[in-house]
Amino acid sequence: MRTDTGQVIRLADYQPTDFVLERVDLTFELDPTETKVEARLIFHRREGTDPAAPLVLDGDSLALQGLLIDQIELDAERYTATPDRLEVRGLPAAEPFEICVTTIINPEANTQLMGLYRTNGIYCTQCEAEGFRRITYFPDRPDVLALYTVNIIADKQANPLLLSNGNFLGGAGFGPDKHFAAWFDPHPKPSYLFALVAGDLGVVEDTFTTMTGREVALKIYVEHGKEPRAAYAMDALKRSMKWDEERFGREYDLDIFMIVAVSDFNMGAMENKGLNVFNDKYILADPETATDADYANIEAIIAHEYFHNWTGNRITCRDWFQLCLKEGLTVYRDHEFSADQRSRAVKRIAEVRHLRAEQFPEDAGPLAHPVRPTTYREINNFYTTTVYEKGSEVTRMISTILGPDLFKKGMDIYFDRHDGEATTVETFVKCFEDASGRDLGQFSLWYNQAGTPLVTASAEYDAARKTFSLSLEQMIPATPGQPNKSPAHIPLKFALILPNGGIAEPSKVTGATVTDDVLHLVKRKQKVVFSGISARPVLSLNRGFSAPVNLHFPMPVPDLIHIARHDTDLFARWQAITDIALSILTAAARDVRAGQPASCDPALIDTLYAIASDDTLEPAFRAQALLLPTESDIARELGADNDPDAIHAARVAVIAAIASHDPARFVSLYEAMETSGAFSPDAASAGKRALRNCALTYLAHAEASPQRVAAAFAGANNMTELAHALSLLVHAYPDADETRQALETFKDRFQDNALVIDKWFSIQATAPGDAALSRVKALKADPLFNAGNPNRVRSLIGSFAFGNPTGFNRKDGAGYDFLASEILAIDGKNPQLASRLLTSMRSWQSLEATRSAHARAALERIEAASGLSTDVRDIVERMLKA
Ligand code: B3K
Ligand code: ZN
């Protein structure tokens, strides 16, 4: 394991390499514990660089076995090899040379799951960001693009499949028991996109005919017997390929596109050129075992990795500081894809919920960093929601500012101009400036300034003058290393909604540029006056969540209800309901903390009942409206000094009050949303199930007996409803016999399906209250728990730390202590998994004093441990420093 060297990498220090890599020829002789890797690399010295400069290659835990330059063994004094670096001196000044490096690696012992490793008998690789250097010494950085040939030799019986990037060149037998295969990738690529897979897997095959009529072979490899569960992933892949052609004009560029699903994987999936490797959680689905959320995730992640073929692979990043160039843009593309495949409004609501739940806390805490950071110690710690989701929002804002046509024109320029390059955020933005003739200089601050802007608004209507005045102010909070911020360019979509529900068309606007329905806030303070407004309007601001900001715009409840009823933007309607709910929930949390009972304003009850039974609204939207803000939403709104127990109690009380008002309404909603016939994962059916589950949640809060939920569990014919019923039993009726029985039934029925058993762990780990910790400890001792499988660790430890506000944040600090011990144990085996789990404590400073003191102590215990990985040390030090 790489332990911390304290080295800080800076964007400002970027330098191209001294040597240009032309060709890569790799030969792998696979063996579970002693794989031989021979890397033949052809380099030439870059023009204009020091003719005496040595060639320096990256390594990580490597041992050099052989080194040849132009086939001749090198004298010992001409090179220095350490586990993390190979330096070669005295190389030719101008002409190309070939260096041949041999290393022996042990895939079986690779518990970090970076580089080449073995999972369930399958060899597979994960190289992004810096895993290739665990395979061989190499200039392991994204701006080194080369053509790769890969030869794989392995035992034939154990590894009938030998896969790598690009197109298949050929294969043959190799000695009595072995065979080999050769692959050539005609597209220059950086090492992080290299992939190799070998083993014995089942396959699902299909074809796709591209827009120019080329036939592409599609193959999804899964464990034998699981092939039928890959059908939905294949369908999503074909839809993604078609959509990228239609929407962005992007065609696939190899003869074959392969996906391999593995069960031990550190993240969701990886976009290796022509050979994506996926966490099987994001491939395998069938009605009996996958929820609607699983189906939606599979669709989105298949699309995301496929879209990387252009945004990431054909055009890649110059350095890792530019990560948002591929990730933010590709998330934007997958969001648009899902919006087109499903309900755009519901998708947008889900995106914003996710952004607020994950990215806003990151941006408000000690781990805040710009979308494009300027320093890092461990790049793996920067695959964050800020880089991904805020990065996507920044792309979306470019589209909002320019409008769809100029945005498309800018994207076309980007694809034409930078194809085959490793480039930067600046060149990306320049494409849109060139497309539109606009100056995006101020806009670019979004890439460089961390922190969620706070926009404060107040408005006044002058009936005599028929003017509507709006005062706007923006403030971007200080974040680590960035005490002072400049005003950002904030594009705010808006509508002035008249009493009759129509939208006012002002005769004149002063004080801000308005393009179509977008108001451009560019100064710290702006006063905007709309003239010719015939009646007092209600302002709907930041419609569609056009800018990722916190908006403070105090509005009377009747105005919010007016938006909730009349806005033509469904997102804004949802937001208005959420605003009403959030003010009631925060007030309730304060009351509970002060020892008072929580209460619920009848206005919210009326609004929710009206929405629930409004058949003109799609069920998925109604479900989103009825799903009240989460406990972490309430905590965020309360800001500092928050008490998770009070928040939980208040939320439960408000939901119970809403449900008890007229439970029969929820019963009929529950019954009306029953889906009949064969299961279909389509968005409309999923929406009905979401609303049905939502109705059941309300009923579970109103009814003391678990009978109804137990019946729902017994009668469920799909995993969405089954898992939800189980979750309600465990969370709302923890001590009931029905709950114990349901847990047993579920475990017995699905014990052979790891992905479903993950749900069984996760549901129990998120059940609220002080009892959670002992439950989690007991579950850790369950024979089904497997500390070596990242999905299982995340389903138990991750669900507890990220998804159980009361259980994890116990007032005695035992939750933090438990997590600290787990982190230290996991760090020795899998640092990426450990550091990701540790980010669950990113908001520790906003807890009330007793809890935050315990949290600090746990963090200090981690910090004091010896032999920490760079990953964990970086996170823990940033968390304690701010
Ligand atoms: N690019 C990968 C993530 C790699 C993470 C490395 N720690 C998956 C994705 O974003 O598509
Ligand atoms: Zn990505």
Image: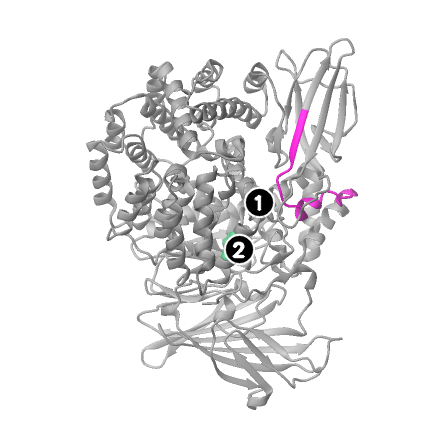
Q: With 191 as the anchor, is 865 left or right in this view?
A: left
Residue at 47% of width from left, 48% of height from top? 856
In the rendered view of the protein, which quadrant contains the N terminus?
Answer: bottom left
Locate residue 79, reporting x and y percent: 58, 84
| Badge 1 amino acid | Arg
Percent x, y of residue 815 = 37, 45
User: Which callout, 1 or 2, points to the residue nearer the camera?
Assistant: 2
Q: Which is more toward the observer, 180 or 126?
A: 126
Q: Residue at x 51, y 54 (%)?
A: 875
Looking at the image, residue 263 lies above or below residue 594: below
The answer for how far apart the CA atoms under marks 1 and 2 are is 34 Å
Instruction: Identify the residue shown where x is 59% and y is 21%.
Output: 567
- Helix, strand or loop at disc 2? helix
Q: In the rendered structure, which segment of residues is drawn in magenta?
A: 436-457
Q: Who is closer to the viewer here, 645 or 869? A: 645
Residue 57 is drawn in which quadrant?
bottom right
Indicate whether 788 appears above or below 16: above
